[in-house]
Amino acid sequence: MKISVIGCGYVGLVSGTCLAALGHKIIGVDVDAKRVTALTQGQVPIYEPGLSELILAQAAAGRLRFTTDIAEAIQESQSIFIAVGTPPSRKGGADLSMLFAAVDDVLKYANGPKTLVIKSTVPPGTGEIVAQRVASGPHRIEVVNNPEFLREGTAIQDFMQPDRIVFGANSNGGMEVLREIYQPLIDRGYAIFSMSRQSAELTKFASNAMLAMRISFINELSQLALAIGADIESVRVGIGTDKRIGPSFLKAGVGYGGSCFPKDVAALVHQMREFGLEPHLLSGVEKANAGQKRAYATRLIKALSDIKDPQVAIWGLAFKADTDDMREAPSIEIVHALLAAGIKVRVYDPQAMENARRILDKHVIWADGVDECTRGADAVALITDWSIFITQDWGHIASLMRGRHVFDGRNCLSSSKVLAAGLIYRAIGRPELMPGAGKPGSMGMISAG
């Protein structure tokens, strides 16, 4: 099928490239001429493992090209995916201006019947508004919803080997088009769930809100665990092995970030209140996440309070490993809190440095690697669990540092190796460990640290 994808950001690029890999002919459309030129030359503006190689392969096979000519793309395509951004609006909820602009372009340039696939994350009910908007045109435009469930760092795998694919359509015709598009994955046995547009839209928000709630739940418990001397890693395993609960997204850390969880939880809170409903759980999820970031920064500041001209090495800035995405990254608030407390901050991230420079305070010191970031630091604060940080030689790290504090914000470091280097180990929801003091008893299994 000939398909155009409007929006060559993260979702649009991954979705369009993977659709090309399924055998469709894809036209990627973006208003940014520089981005289109770069993509045409094989230069990918985002970091996602395997994406650059897949784009080059599909372009070489003649199944993928990029353009700024939206009229031509729409007229050449049978189906149009909209994958533009829906950022938070100033009034609360989602800003749908880019989505509606793309819809209006489809309405303006359509030269025959089309299927409009909303891939962007939109508040429940948006599809109905779009359907009413395109109903005035001379050609039949079927509006369907096909939410994305892509995790940054594993997005290609998530698209090509999905847990499930959700079709949201209010007509048999729209459903049949989605089945044709995804037939290669259907033939491989991946689960397809068909429902109304409204249900599909809410499914996307509910999925992200549920995962955010699990993260905030374990993070809130981690603060109690620290207060009473329990180990949240043991607690995590103890509850996660219950088949009714499961282990996913129960890893304590400095809080969630990224382009999805913060925005989607906030949008649900806003929409519920618009309907006169009080989002007791969801508003609590937001508060718990904000509190987790503050708590980590506060512990750092307190540990260095007696040190003259304290310095902290921040390991990791992106909101998660294997991405360069700085949107709502916990590191932003943590770094700003440290600077406000008069602490010198040196930072390093394997991929996110360029994006971080646009966001972080000018007083941050930018390092070119782990050693330069760590040299002279009174504390190492791991924020993002990149493998390069997890596999460090702690004897070497200790020789670079001025102080002895290590704050593991992802509970991913080997505490025994940190302690063997003569350093103090502090993690999330786990007892503080001093060199030579030994480790508290575990529950008899291998776990982080």
Image: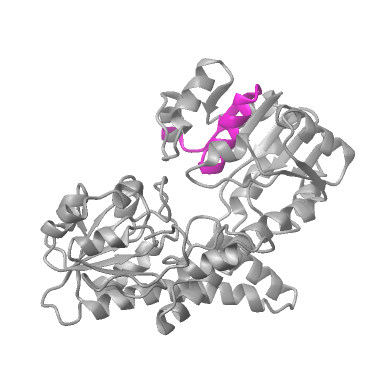
On screen, residue 177 versus residue 415, left or right, reads: right
Residue depicted at x 46% and y 71%: 232
Q: Residue furthest right?
A: 172
- Viewer-proximal residue, 408 or 292? 408
Please provide the residue range marked out in magenta.
8-34
Q: Is 431 drawn above or below residue 67 in the view shown?
A: below
Q: Residue furthest top?
A: 61
**Residue 10 located within the stretch drawn in magenta:** yes
- Viewer-proximal residue, 5 or 238? 238
Residue depicted at x 31% and y 75%: 432
Quadrant (top left, top right, bottom left, bottom right) of the C terminus: bottom left
Q: Is residue 17 visible?
A: yes
Quarter assignment of residue 340: bottom left
Residue depicted at x 73% and y 77%: 277
**Residue 31 located within the stretch drawn in magenta:** yes
Q: How is the image coloured?
A: one colour
Quadrant (top left, top right, bottom left, bottom right) of the N terminus: top right
